[in-house]
Amino acid sequence: MTRVWIITGASAGFGLQLAKIAVEAGDTVIAASRNPSKLSEVKGITPMRLDHNEPFDQVKKDIDAMVALHGRVDVVVNNAAYVQTGTLEETSPEETLNQLQSNVLGPLNVYRAVLPHMRAAKSGTLVTIGSMNAWLPFNACNLYNMSKAAVRAIGVGIAEEVRPFGIRHCLVEPGAFRTSLLDPSANFAATSGMARLDDYKQINAETDAIFAMINGKQPGDPVKGCQIIYDVVTSTGVAEGREMPEFLPLGSDAVNVIVASVQKVLGQVEEWKDVARQSDIKQITE
């Protein structure tokens, strides 16, 4: 059966690649972007304007128009995001809100707008593109780390809330892939009056150097990664016969980071559980 997709942030990176793969598979794709003209030459894709940072009423109006185009929507992918760099002290409250708006609050409004249509149909799939940064915070990227940790927590909750209506949710947490995410033009260094304080010069320089070093050399192949996402959503290819998971790490580096993070957490819980349990009203023993 042909599926109807809405993919946000579809003008580049994962969004664009996933859109191409879905179209090549015979599905219908609405590529949502703030600049849909960039997608006009991509064969088979229907570009439509969506800025999820606009007020909810406008987001709902745009999503409703997309759904009306084919009378339904089967898969919605929240992909749009950016990286705000700078240490916590250097970044301003406005930059903090902007990061949250773009990476967390905007995507939530997309889901708020589309869920009534999926509930009415008693079916649908939501896909949220997170990041391994939710597990391993990167220096001088605290706002981005925070946004992806929030996406992880919210994604787990969404999956439980929508399951009774026949709606699925998958949180995809990629490692480093060769997209434009780390390009200097795609990211925002701290621009507040506090920006680039001398005391943080070294940590900022180290982060800038790492970004410059790995940009264009990331281990993840976005074509392979997006093909896996498509296969997992449709239970085809490498995921044939397998049920879509609620959480999908993507890339060897993501797997390694998440395993190491979980092991560290389990180790600390094991070390301190005897102390933690002393706070119970009634003592619990093993």
Image (cartoon, rainbow, N blue to C red):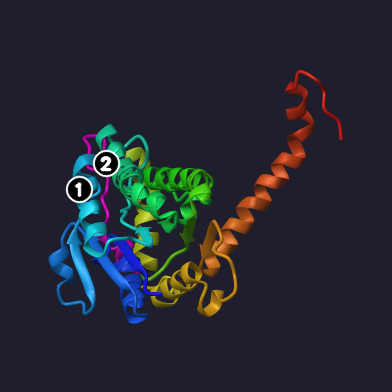
Task: Report whether 107 appears left or right of 39.
Answer: right
Residue 12 position within the rendered picture, expressed as x and y whole percent measured from the top left: 27, 67
Farthest residue in the left direction? 37
Task: Identify the main secondary structure in magenta.
Answer: loop
Q: Is residue 242 above or below residue 172?
A: below
90 and 10: which is toward the camera = 10
Q: Amino acid at mark 1?
A: Lys
Q: Are marks 1 and 2 in contact (CB under 8 Å)?
A: no
- In the figure, is residue 236 to the left or right of 39? right
Task: Say which residue label 1 marks.
Answer: 61
Residue 102 in sight in this render: yes
Instruction: Answer with the quarter of the image where residue 53 lies.
Output: top left
Callout 2: SS: helix
Pick whichever, 258 or 190, lies toward us. Answer: 258
Q: Earlier in the sequence, mark 1 or mark 2?
A: 1
Q: Is residue 32 above or below residue 21?
A: above
Give the residue at x 70% y 46%: 266
Mark 2 = which residue? Answer: 98
**Residue 201 x, y percent position in the rendering:** 34, 45
Identify the residue at image location x=54%, y=46%: 160
In the figure, is residue 145 to the left or right of 242?
left
- Three-letter code, disc 2: Asn
Q: Could you say which is closer to the camera, residue 122 or residue 269?
A: 122
Quadrant in the picture for the C terminus: top right
**SS for tag 1?**
helix
Magenta residue span: 179-197
Whether residue 194 is in magenta: the answer is yes
